[in-house]
Amino acid sequence: MIKIRRTKCPPELDTNSQPLSEHDYTHDNVLTCLLNMQHHKCCYCEKDLQLIGQSAMWVEHFIARSDDCFKDVNGNINWNQVNAWANLLYSCSTCNNSKGSKNPFDKNCGERRLIDPSYSRIDPEKHIDFIINGTAIIYKVMKNSILGRNTIENLKLRKRTDIYQLLRQCKRKIDALFDELVDALVVNNVAMVNSRINDLSKKTSANEPHAAFSRKYLLQKINIFNIDDIQILNKHLELNIKPISINIANGSEIIN
């Protein structure tokens, strides 16, 4: 999960021009704005929504439509609040079903219990991490973060075999590019080195599926290479390879 930069509210949800009704969030332009804002990825697991089909895509009300906070004393629902732009995200059906309708805020103290990746003051990557060891990939709570733990548990991320399969695919692609980079370094193919560094950097861009994982794994590979592997290569092949430096994206940063 990475930070999502909340874009301008689409006119269909502008409460200054008209009150909202129950299904206004389903307007085609609203859906398009959500998809573009999230680079066509699930807001939580970063799965590519274009690959899973329309039936597996859901508009996510961060605070569920059924929550009592949207009802007045007579039980009438305030659709201006339910369908407020800031309350809408796009998710895959698995994340949507896992999250359920439980309020993401503590009703007693108002504190957040779940990560809203579009909330400007929260960077999901400071709360959710990965353990990557061989073929083992596991979602990990960052620095005992309560938000991270609650979000991982609520979305059942540690039990998501569908996501782990996709993360392993990302890992294999990064491994292949990194191997080609090392091969190019050994033969001093500068053009190929620059090309593969650029390819690897793009893998961490916010518009790439599973960018948070790719950032973590690529940084791990760079550190291992620069600390251990480079010394072995230089010593036994009598080379003078310099430490690798690759631009890794942050938050909603796009790398072209």
Image (cartoon, rainbow, N blue to C red):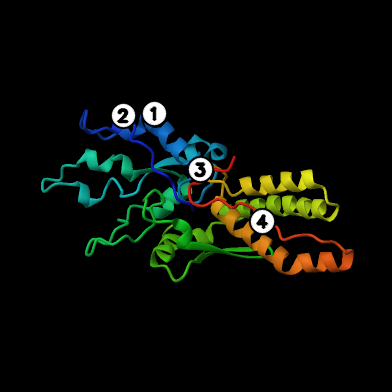
Picture quadrant of residue 22: top left
Q: Residue at x 36, y 51 (%)?
A: 119
Upstream in the sequence, badge 3 or badge 2? 2
Q: Earlier along the polypeptide chain: callout 1 or callout 3?
A: 1
Label 2 with label 1: CB-CB less than 8 Å: yes
Give the class, few, some or many, for how many residues have Cα within 10 Å of label 2's Cα (few <14, many ≥20): few
| Residue type indicated by callout 2 | Pro
Q: Residue at x 69, y 52 (%)?
A: 174
Q: Which residue is mark 2?
A: 11
Tell me whether the residue at label 3 lies in contact with that at label 4, contact meaning CB atoms closer than 8 angstroms: no
Residue picked out by circle 3: 41
Secondary structure beneath label 2: helix
Callout 4 secondary element: loop
Mark drawn on residue 245: 4
What type is the residue that disc 1 sits on? Answer: Asn
Q: Is residue 62 left or right of residue 16?
A: right
Going from the N terminus, do you reach mark 1 or mark 4 first?
Answer: 1
In terms of secondary structure, where does tag 3 sit? loop
Instruction: Report the residue marked by disc 1.
Output: 29
